[in-house]
Amino acid sequence: MPMLRPPGVYRPQADTALLAGALRRAGVAAGARVLDVGTGTGAMAVAAARCGAREVVAVDVAAGAVLAARVNARLRNLPVRVLRGDLFEPVAGERFDVIVANPPYVIGDAFPEEVRGRARAWEAGPCGRALLDRICAQAPAHLAPGGTLLVVQSALSGVAATLVALRDAGTRPVVAARRDEPFGPVMRRRAASLEARGAVRCGQRHEELVVVRADLTGTRGHGHNGHGGYGGYGGRGGPAGGGERGGRRDGARRAA
């Protein structure tokens, strides 16, 4: 059954699929609580529920996305609680075994809070990190002992910065998955300006999508293979995978 998507809500794309695959490989323990930050249509929340989570909470700042996620979960008879709000505000004081996040990460002049409509799904400021930095700083406080964060982004938005920020926040981060994707419409339109600012190579029309996994230091995450470390990451370049974003994913910043 396809995900229902009202106008203005970002559709699941290559980054959603990459993140869902990383979630399946990480594993969701029976009885686990999962949080989907920036749920959009609810695609990742649905994936988490199907992986066996006891409880799934999905958060999005956009009313249309909240409605879409609720409808999509109910149509599948899945235990998903959908809340409206900014990142972790609706779940203040709560902790989760797994947190998944697919934030906006396309480099541009606008910040998420400055735009309306569909552009909220991809606009992430001059470095592409307007929400990534907030997630790296705030997510560890919402992880239960042994908890795992999975976040997807473009290599153009600085994977090394994500790894360092998550390490400094007390987690053990690793690159869990990566995939090259052609630029989508947004990135194709923006390619010349990105070349001018040195964010992409001349003629570059692809980007690498990356999933970063972060487990709490000194604990075992869900299915963690024991390989820690984060250093030496060198992305092959490119924001969100071949979709609208250029092409991006599905979620909080992504919805209208």
Image (cartoon, grey):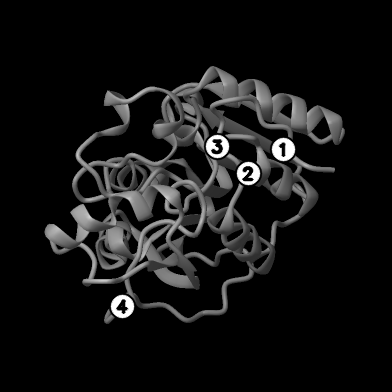
Residue, disc 4? 233
> In the image, is 8 to the left or to the right of 222?
left
Which comes sooner in the sequence, label 2 or label 3? 3
> Which one is earlier in the sequence, the residue at label 3 or at label 1?
3
**Amino acid identity at mark 2:** Val
Q: Which residue is mark 3?
A: 10
In x, y percent, where is residue 26? 63, 66
The Cα–Cα distance between marks 1 and 2, rounded to whole angstroms, is: 6 Å
For the residues labelled 1 and 4, say whether their Cβ atoms are less than 8 Å apart. Answer: no
Q: Is residue 193 left or right of residue 52?
A: left
Which quadrant would residue 218 be assigned to in this image? bottom left
- Which residue, given by chain and number where applicable, does mark 2 sit on? 34
Which residue position holds label 1?
55
Measured as percent of width and height from the top left, residue 10 is found at 55, 37
Nearer the observer, disc 1 or disc 4? 4
Sequence-first disc among 3 and 4: 3
Task: Measure how far apart labels 3 and 4 are at the Cα level.
Answer: 29 Å
Q: Quadrant of the N terminus?
A: top right
Q: Position of residue 155 (x, y in %)?
A: 34, 65
Question: Callout 3: helix, strand or loop?
Answer: loop
Instruction: Tell me the crowding category of disc 2: few under 14, some 14 to 19, or many 20 or more residues within 10 angstroms, Cα based.
Output: many
